[in-house]
Amino acid sequence: MNKKKITHLALESYNGVYLNERKVNLISSLFNRSDLKKYITALKSLDNTKKIIVSSPGYIDQRSFSKIFPNKRIIVKKDSSLLLGVQIVDNDTVYRYSLKDTLNKIIENIEKDYD
Amino acid sequence: MIDADKIVQNLEKKLATFGTDLKTQNIGKVIKYADGVVIASGLSKATMGEKVFFNDGSTGVVLNLDEDSVSITLLDVGQKIKEGDIVKTTGLTLGIDVSDSLLGRVISPLGEALDGKQKIKKDKTMPLEKIAPGVIKREPVNKPLKTGIKAIDSMIPIGRGQRELIIGDRQTGKTAIAIDTIINQKLKTKSEKQVICIYVAIGQKRSTITQIIDRLSSSGALSYSIVVAASSSEPASLQYLAPYAGAAIAEYFLEKGKDVLVVYDDLTKHAWSYRQISLVLRRPAGREAYPGDIFYLHSRLLERAVKLNKENGGGSITALPIIETQANDISAYIPTNVISITDGQIYLQADLFNAGIRPAINVGQSVSRVGGAAQTPAIKSISGKLRLDLAQYNSLAAFSQFGSELDPATQKQLDRGKRLIEILKQPQFHPLSESLEFLSIFAVTNGLMDDIPLESFERFETELHNFIPRNNPKIIEEFSSGEKPKVELLDKIKKIILEFKKGF
């Protein structure tokens, strides 16, 4: 089975933003070993496009993010290293507001301006 | 002394505007790592040639953009990279930090100091890949770049802004010509413009690079030179980038209106490293397993050698690429590619080298397409006769093998030819000034050395070069302008040489 068909089947395994376990079991039973590996890879990469990981040191209001990203699953994580900020991972793009980055930028500027 | 109040003020300013600094990064995950190439998923916004960072601090450059993945060539060893590691884009293409403090330093193709001295100060970041200046900005090559080697300056002259290929088998003296040219750029008068020299070592042994640096240092040439080193133990990606780093540094000085000489030693190894990278990236292999764009690899590099017109600063970049042939085959793939790009070639032959003719230049097959435009009138006045006499000798030399008796005119021609070949020999690391080159060639082409035994030629020449500046320094001054010498001056020189011969 070619890669395009496997990717299409992986898309069909979803109900909206959630994987349908029954469909996954049904489809995976049709594959040989190598096609199954491709199917798993396709599911993993599709899953990344269907979720948003929000990290913050404090409390996150999940509902406000659901309004901004209506067609994605919102996963919330705690990350104390961010220092008064928030990080949003949308597939392969990372958006970050963080005091840690600001402080790092100040250090870089100081190192650049003062020998 | 860092002002603490200033730092706190900066911090307070940043805090007041905190929340408006959004950092956006495009990330990926390592799927596969083999042979110095990392395949990563994600990185959907990565561009070709973009620099990327790994978790362990390694850097890489994006060289392949596929449908679901990106191929990244590592710029360092990357021993700690493993599957699943995060790769981040930087939004930057490869560049090198340059400044005047690079002079006298030995650096890697990424600008890191390799000589153990202090950190290099940054004035500007120059991109490694840059489109060469257009036709409108250029002017014809019209100023000589003196190599100090008689055979080259008289018959294969190089001009500032020219690309002259040095080609030959291994151990024929290719690097020696390049090093002598760099040493000869040492300023002799204050009115001259210093030529900045950049030596790019690609895929060479570290011991060889050390010897070259040592020689440049002892000759006083390192103060106006920069060495970009990517030895054979460096990753192929660094060897691939080294010549472009040399070109980028040259362009920094070019923008300031300076004349720059760049030696690429050697482009054969550069082609090998690019072949290695392309094969690992699974790009289609062409002739001799080189990728399809192997010509473009060298053409875009050498096109950056330029002579700019006055409106654009008047600076120049002269390129001396070196190519190593196998068994004198200049019709192989890479040599023919580079010969077609450059403005001439200096062809070195092993059998000439073994016969004691050093530099082992085959004058018949060497050419400079710039020619007389890159010569001063003084040298031009004697080079025509030299070339003609040598050509006549070469055509008659075959007859001397027969052992039969030759007529006096032919014998005289043969003797003259032998003397011309003898005068064109020159020891390594002893480049000559134009005035001394003129004296040597003038003496032979005018028959003033016809009675000197061939075995004594070297000694005669050395003592003549000491005699004339010591006893007649004004003669040397008159030559230094490069103007065509008047008949009276030539007669004067003849008298001085005859006088010297009496005491020899």
Image: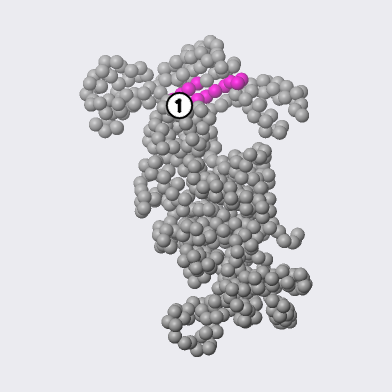
Decide: is B277 above or below B438.
Answer: above
Please report the residue visible at 56 percent of the width from the left and 48 percent of the height from the top. Answer: B209
In which chain is the residue bearing label 1? B
Image point 45% across, 32% down: which residue? B43
Residue B384 visible in rendering: no
> Is B186 on the left or on the right of B294, as rendered?
right
Q: Please, what is the dominant secondary structure of the magenta stretch?
A: strand
- Report the amino acid beneath label 1: Asp
Q: Is residue A91 magenta?
A: yes
The region drawn magenta spans: A88-100
The residue carrying mark 1 is: B85
Q: Position of residue B82 (x, y in %)?
A: 43, 27
Residue B119: give x, y in percent of width and height: 65, 38
Q: Residue at x 50, y 36 (%)?
A: B76
Above or below: residue A105 compared with residue A63: below
Q: Residue furthest top?
A: A59
- Classify 10 Å Cα crowding around label 1: few (below 14), some (14-19), many (20 and above): some
Q: Quadrant of the C terminus of chain B?
A: bottom right
Viewer-side residue, B81 vs B39: B81
Residue A96 on the magenta span: yes
Towards the viewer: A15 or A78: A78
